[in-house]
Image: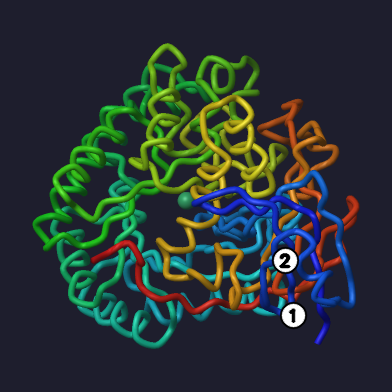
């Protein structure tokens, strides 16, 4: 087995920052040494990597991606191959994607379908959550099987998209009760979809068809209301672990904070788009340009205090995780489906490549500590979804998923240079301080010196345990 020494770097964990040398043996981390200690003991490796002046962090864990997601006769434009390769470029070494079941479909068949898409194609390790679009006796029974045998321990429900994926409150309660019985986590897309559909129809009937109305027909109180309702249902179901996905709004954060203060097992994630974009700067751009930023929940107004609240939530752990909700659709042909009707614009942004960089900007700006950057982007996502300490840790025995990050480098995000399979960048022209220098996945160097040296099929499916934040 090949050994690898990462020397003279600064190891960042969720609990501290310290100069350390890291020895990798095969696919796992063998030992950590005080600087120079290994040399004085005569310990050498097949290969040395000099990390002087750089951070050595556990590889990023992005728990919310949608590679090849089917949507209205088309697909999200990143395959498992291109999407995981782009993730690797950006310092993410594990993704958790979503297998989708609609009403009438067999959950196990849909999970098998997603396995077939991913197997042999991924550049980095991956797992699955299961979306339950049709809660019934069969799908509830399937939840048991997935937890017991498939390493799929989290189930996503939708309070949005009536007629497509929406579960009503009764269905949600049933799924939550089942999750409680088997220790599983319920993930929730929390927006009041019934009310939103009324507002969309009213906008369209007034001829208000531009992309900006996508956001205006999904007002933030409807995210807050749904988040609160999900928290109440989770409490009634017996304090089942509830994880609110892609939070964008102050009202929703308040609902989660209040549930947490009452001792509930409620957690939440946000995504870079909600921390940085505003309606005024994105969706409101003229000539259909705004279509580039259509995602749900939508980007919010900069005149409110959503963004500062979300950053504060990240500091105080009311928001535990940053994911991307990576779901790219090209502008040509796909976004243009929504010309003259914002409701037909495919929802989703490409971002899997940029999360580590974008949240590091929070460190640069003084919004987050270095430790908290690593915690929200790597450690907590791994613990939340039962992957720790195999993932999310630089410790003996953990998988050698390691990113060497150069704080002195800088780069500019652009469709010209990104590796995601999408013909534009929502982040075009954004200057970023810091840059990924080297990426190691299970002991294999897959990105170094601005070159991708990994391969499709290196990434392995990861069976997951239960949420590791429960008592
Ligand atoms: Zn999503």
Please rate how many residues cluster around mark 2, counting C-alpha atoms within 10 Å: few if below 14, some from 14 to 19, many from 20. many
Nearer the observer: mark 1 or 2; the answer is 2
Task: Answer left or right for 253 relative to 315.
Answer: left
Q: Nearer the viewer, residue 343 or 10?
A: 10
Please rate how many residues cluster around mark 1, counting C-alpha atoms within 10 Å: few if below 14, some from 14 to 19, many from 20. many
Tell me the residue at 49%/48% (across/down): 376
Residue 22, which numbered label? Answer: 2
Q: Position of residue 258 (x, y in %)?
A: 19, 38
**Picture quarter with the N terminus:** bottom right
Which type of secondary structure does the marked residue at label 2 adopt? strand
Task: Answer left or right for 74 relative to 231.
Answer: right
Tell me the residue at 40%/76% (across/down): 465
Q: Position of residue 256 (x, y in %)?
A: 26, 41
Which type of secondary structure does the marked residue at label 1 adopt? strand
Residue designated by label 1: 25
Q: Is residue 451 above or below residue 121?
A: above
Q: Nearer the viewer, residue 181 or 190?
A: 181
Quarter occupied by residue 92: bottom right
């Amino acid at each position: 087995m090949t050994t690898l020494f990462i020397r003279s770097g600064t190891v960042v964990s969720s609990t501290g920052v310290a100069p350390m040398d890291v020895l990798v043996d095969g696919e796992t981390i063998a030992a950590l040494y005080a600087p120079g200690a290994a040399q004085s003991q005569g310990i050498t490796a097949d290969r040395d990597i000099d990390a002087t002046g750089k951070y050595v962090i556990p590889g990023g864990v992005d728990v919310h991606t949608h590679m090849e997601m089917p949507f209205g006769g088309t697909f999200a434009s990143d395959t498992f191959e291109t999407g995981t390769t782009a993730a690797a470029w950006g310092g993410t070494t594990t993704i958790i994607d979503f297998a989708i079941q609609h009403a009438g479909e067999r959950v196990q068949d849909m999970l098998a379908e997603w396995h077939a898409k991913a197997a042999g194609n991924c550049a980095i390790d991956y797992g699955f959550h299961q979306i339950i679009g049709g809660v019934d006796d069969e799908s509830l029974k399937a939840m048991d099987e997935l937890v017991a045998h498939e390493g799929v321990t989290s189930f996503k429900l939708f309070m949005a998209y009536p007629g497509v994926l929406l579960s009503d409150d009764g269905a949600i309660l049933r799924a939550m009760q089942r999750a409680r019985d088997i220790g599983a986590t319920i993930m929730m897309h929390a927006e009041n979809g019934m009310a939103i559909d009324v507002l969309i129809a009213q906008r369209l009937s007034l001829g208000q068809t531009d992309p900006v109305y996508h956001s205006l027909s999904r007002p933030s109180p409807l995210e807050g209301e749904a988040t609160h309702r999900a928290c109440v249902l989770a409490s009634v179901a017996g304090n089942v672990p509830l994880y609110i996905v892609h939070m964008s709004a102050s009202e929703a954060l308040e609902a989660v904070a209040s549930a947490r203060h009452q001792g509930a097992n409620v957690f939440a994630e946000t995504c870079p788009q909600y921390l940085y974009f505003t309606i005024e700067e994105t969706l409101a751009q003229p000539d259909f340009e705004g279509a580039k930023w259509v995602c749900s929940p939508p980007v919010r107004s900069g005149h409110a205090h959503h963004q500062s609240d979300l950053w504060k939530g990240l500091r105080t752990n009311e928001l535990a995780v940053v994911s991307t909700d990576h779901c790219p659709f090209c502008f040509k042909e796909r976004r243009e489906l929504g010309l003259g009707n914002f409701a037909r614009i495919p929802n989703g942004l490409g971002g899997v490549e940029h999360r580590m960089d974008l949240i590091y900007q929070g460190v640069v700006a003084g919004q987050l500590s270095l430790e908290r950057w690593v915690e929200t982007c790597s450690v907590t996502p791994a613990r939340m979804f039962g992957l720790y300490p195999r993932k999310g840790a630089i410790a003996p025995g953990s998988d050698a998923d390691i990113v060497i990050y150069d704080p002195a480098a800088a780069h500019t995000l652009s469709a010209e240079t990104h590796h995601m399979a999408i013909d534009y960048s929502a982040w075009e022209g954004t200057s970023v301080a810091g840059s990924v220098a080297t990426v190691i996945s299970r002991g294999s160097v897959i990105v170094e010196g601005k070159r991708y040296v990994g391969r499709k099929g290196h990434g392995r499916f990861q069976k997951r345990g239960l949420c590791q934040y429960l008592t």
